[in-house]
Image (spheres, grey):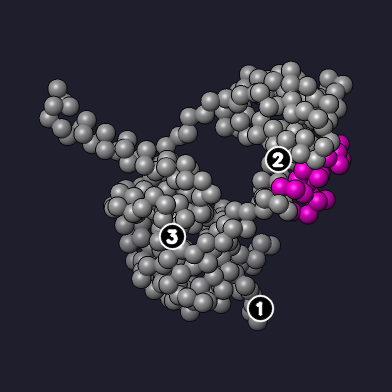
């Protein structure tokens, strides 16, 4: 993300150096840098109203700021993220010798209950894909079918999907080379239906380009981003869900990503393999899907076991 577009609390050079470090050393994505910039801006504004510089904030003021966020109704996950940004900033100052102590070191964030992801059962996914395949044979229908087949076959994040370069499968049609969060690359296998959908879509891909132009994206668009947007894909998916008779509000690209992971695990896939395909840096993020399966099994027993009814 260009520095001039990044939030800069009072143009603080230490904050700028911190964000540059996140970008250069940790490969932080532009959205992450923007979020940390906003978080530090909000904290800096709080300190300025109390005539305290960001560099000199004591533990007490950090605690008051975090408690104030919770009291104002901010979610536990958002409050925890803001505290994380503050912690990482002061750790950076200590590591660079800019400040001798870390005033955030003893603070505890709010306890977060990670919500179980909303998923679709296999029958619902099959209905959705069948409906997409059965639509009129237009270029738009072919593209949507291809997007859907790839998404359920790979579990890509929606931003990864719509931004796929056409070169992602140039070396091997059985694999997609995906660049995920932080610029990390991973290989994700493609099944036969997804490969067939891509092959069919490539024959109509030029319909989405201005005449005589080229694009590096698999799903090009005439819009400013150069590729189909996440918002537009979500709209198209919602329309397809409504046509299928499924609740449109419950169907989203992220719901299908959840379905990909949960269905794989339900059929015996290895958790580490699913982690790699999803592009999760930490396996604890992937483990949420095992909780989904456990919850579903418990509900199944309570509903159908004769002793459970009693």
Earlier in the chain: of badge 2 and badge 3, it is 2
Verify whether residue 9 appears in magenta: yes
Q: Which residue is drawn at the image coordinates 36% and 71% (left, top)?
A: 192
How far apart marks 2 and 1 lie (CA) works out to 38 Å
Q: Nearer the viewer, mark 1 or mark 3?
A: 3
Residue 85 shows up from this direction = yes
Front residue of this view, candidates 117 and 273:
273
Answer whether residue 130 is magenta in the image: no
Instruction: Tell me if 103 is positioned left or right of 278 in this view.
Output: right
The circle on residue 36 is 2
Does dot 1 land on a helix, a strand or a loop?
loop
Q: Earlier in the sequence, mark 2 or mark 1?
A: 2
Question: Which dot marks residue 213?
Answer: 1
* Range drawn in magenta: 1-22
- Which quadrant would residue 106 be assigned to in this image? top right
Q: Secondary structure at mark 2?
A: helix
Task: Report how far apart the C-alphas of labels 2 and 3 lie in the structure.
Answer: 30 Å
Q: Categorize mark 3 by other alpha carbons within 10 Å: few (<14), some (14-19), many (20+).
A: many
* Residue 219 drawn at (x, y percent): 55, 68
Q: Residues within 10 Å of mark 2 (few under 14, many from 20)?
A: many
Residue 30 point in image, percent of width and height: 69, 51
Q: Are marks 2 and 3 in contact (CB under 8 Å)?
A: no
Residue 222 % position (x, y): 64, 67
Q: State whether residue 60 is above or below residue 164.
A: above
Q: Is residue 17 left or right of residue 237?
A: right
Is 184 left or right of 305, judged from the image as shown? right
Task: Tell me: residue 212, above or below residue 38.
Answer: below
Of 83 and 260, the residue lying toward us: 83
The residue under label 3 is 154
Q: Is residue 235 visible?
A: no
Q: Quadrant of the C terminus?
A: top left
Question: For numbered disc 3, what is the local secondary structure?
Answer: helix
């Amino acid at each position: 993300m260009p520095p001039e577009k990044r939030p800069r609390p009072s143009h603080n050079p230490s904050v700028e150096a911190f964000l540059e470090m996140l970008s250069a050393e940790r490969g932080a994505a532009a959205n992450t840098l923007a979020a940390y910039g906003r978080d530090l801006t909000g904290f800096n504004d709080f300190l300025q109203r109390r005539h305290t510089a960001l560099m000199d904030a004591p533990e007490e003021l950090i605690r008051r700021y975090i408690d104030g966020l919770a009291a104002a109704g901010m979610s536990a996950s958002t409050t925890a993220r803001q505290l994380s940004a503050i912690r990482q900033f002061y750790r950076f100052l200590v590591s660079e010798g800019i400040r001798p102590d870390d005033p955030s070191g003893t603070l505890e964030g709010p306890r977060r209950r990670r919500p179980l992801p909303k998923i679709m059962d296999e029958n619902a996914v099959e209905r959705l894909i069948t409906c997409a395949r059965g639509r009129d044979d237009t270029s738009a229908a072919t593209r949507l079918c291809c997007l859907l087949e790839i998404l359920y076959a790979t579990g890509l994040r929606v931003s990864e999907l719509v931004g796929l370069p056409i070169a992602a499968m140039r070396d091997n049609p059985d694999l997609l080379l995906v660049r995920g969060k932080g610029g990390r690359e991973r290989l994700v296998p493609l099944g036969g239906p997804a490969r067939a959908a891509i092959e069919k879509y490539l024959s109509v891909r030029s319909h989405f380009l201005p005449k005589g132009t080229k694009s590096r994206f698999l799903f090009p668009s005439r819009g400013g981003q150069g590729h189909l947007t996440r918002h537009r894909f979500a709209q198209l998916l919602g329309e397809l869900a409504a046509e299928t008779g499924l609740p449109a509000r419950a169907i989203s690209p992220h719901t299908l990503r959840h379905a990909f992971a949960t269905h794989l695990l339900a059929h015996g896939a290895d958790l580490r393999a699913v982690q790699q395909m999803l592009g999760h840096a930490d396996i604890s993020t992937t483990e949420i899907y095992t909780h989904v399966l456990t919850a579903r099994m418990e509900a199944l027993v309570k509903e159908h076991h004769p002793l459970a009814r009693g």
